[in-house]
Amino acid sequence: MSRHQILTLIAMASINFSSMICYSILGPFFPNEAKKKGVSQAMIGLIFGIYALCTLVGSLLLGKYIVQIGAKFMIVAGLFVSSVCTVLFGFLDQVSDGTVFVVLCFITRCINAIGFSAAVTSSFAVSAKVFPENIATVLGFMEIFTGLGLILGPPLGSWLYQSFGYEIPFVFTGCLLFATVPLNMWILPSFAAVPSSQNSFLRLCTRMKILLICFVVFSLSSGLGFLDATLSIFAIEKLNLSAGSVGLLMIGLSLPYGAASPVFGVISDKYPSIRKWMMVIGGMATAVSFCFLGPLPVFHIRSQLWLTVLMLIVVGFSLCMTCIPTFAEMIACAHENGFEEGLSTLGLVSGLFSAVWSAGMFFGPTIGGYITQALNFEWSAGVQGALAFLAKTVIGNLIMHDLFFFRSQKANRTDTSLLQGEKSPLLPKTDHLRVDVS
């Protein structure tokens, strides 16, 4: 790799790691802390979900204007805003009134989400710009650091919470995220680009293949968001685990995801034709594992720690298998449909990808929290499994359509060549000069 590519890779790795460690520390202890202040399970899910909803809006707007704003400025400014909000979130436990606590949680999470969306949307576009031939491989490599952040966040947050209280986990991780601001200002190169008037989200979203892949991304993030908001309370109440043990439990999801990401990234880039099959197989495994995570009451199986850990490991692998090919496939589809190759198109695709991911992260905790409150965790996990199964079916139908279309084109080409062969003379035309001479 060139020096330019190495510096970009280091910058993107620091963004993924620090952002994910800040995001994931809430899971083990915040839902329980909020319940002490009289916050309902549905409202806790909404606090998790509002972050994703604001990320959705921010991703669409910032992805559209990435060229005008500047990719490097978006990353640096987004990291700064997100780090400050993370530190401020750590002091909300001083608020005694439950309603005021919820309102301040919403405000802080919304502003934090805008900063996060700026950094992540720009980082996806920059990665694809610098590594145009190895998008999935680089994305898989970056997901190692995403996985590390998700792995270290819950146990680190649990340990800091149990040792020092509510404030310290957020202050520590917020300062860690702030340290990436000068780092990225120093090592991240500037990216010059010309805005395109032809590219738009509306034109991108009119492509059926793009929409189907977006639904797959939505189902993946919905499952992750659901687990963030509900798994800790389920583990504490049903499996009798402490907050520290819940942090370790979440490693069962993050570790296989981070470990398998580079492998699936290399496979996706080396064999682009199997990307859709990776989505189908991964979606099927995700559906089955969510159904047995509780497990569903129809199976009449009692909730057990070993089964929960096993299903979390399967979810980690299957989500990785499904997720890694999606971004590269969306970019390829955009180029196939006439979108020019450049930072403007990459900004649109990365903005749409981040927005759909955030939509799922809003849907999962919000609807999952409501179903968990109305019924229980087991049925709510089953709904996530059904969503993953539906996404698998959608992509399976896309594969069948592509195969049928390819065979139809091949048959048409064969028929055309046969017709041309019938119209051609059986004997070649004779050279008149040679006939006269003879």
Image (cartoon, grey):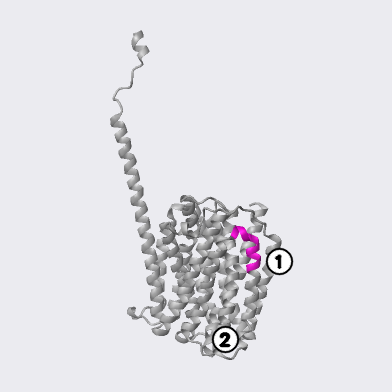
Residue drawn at point x = 33 percent, y = 47 percent: 407
Residue extending farthest to the front is 197
Identify the residue position indicated by label 2 in the image. 101
Disc sitting over residue 182 in the figure: 1
Quarter occupied by the C terminus: top left
- Could you tell me residue 295's position as x and y percent? 39, 78
Disc sitting over residue 432 in the figure: none
How much space separates mark 2 and mark 1, taking CA atoms? 32 Å
**Hey, which quadrant is residue 5 in on the image?**
bottom right
Residue extending farthest to the top is 437
**Hey, which quadrant is residue 389 in on the image?**
bottom left
Provide the secondary structure element on which disc 1 rests: helix
Say above or below: 436 vs 373: above
Dot 2: few (<14), some (14–19), or many (≥20) neighbours within 10 Å?
Answer: some
User: Which residue is more in the foreground, 200 or 166?
Assistant: 200
User: Residues in magenta?
Assistant: 66-78
Three-letter code, disc 1: Pro
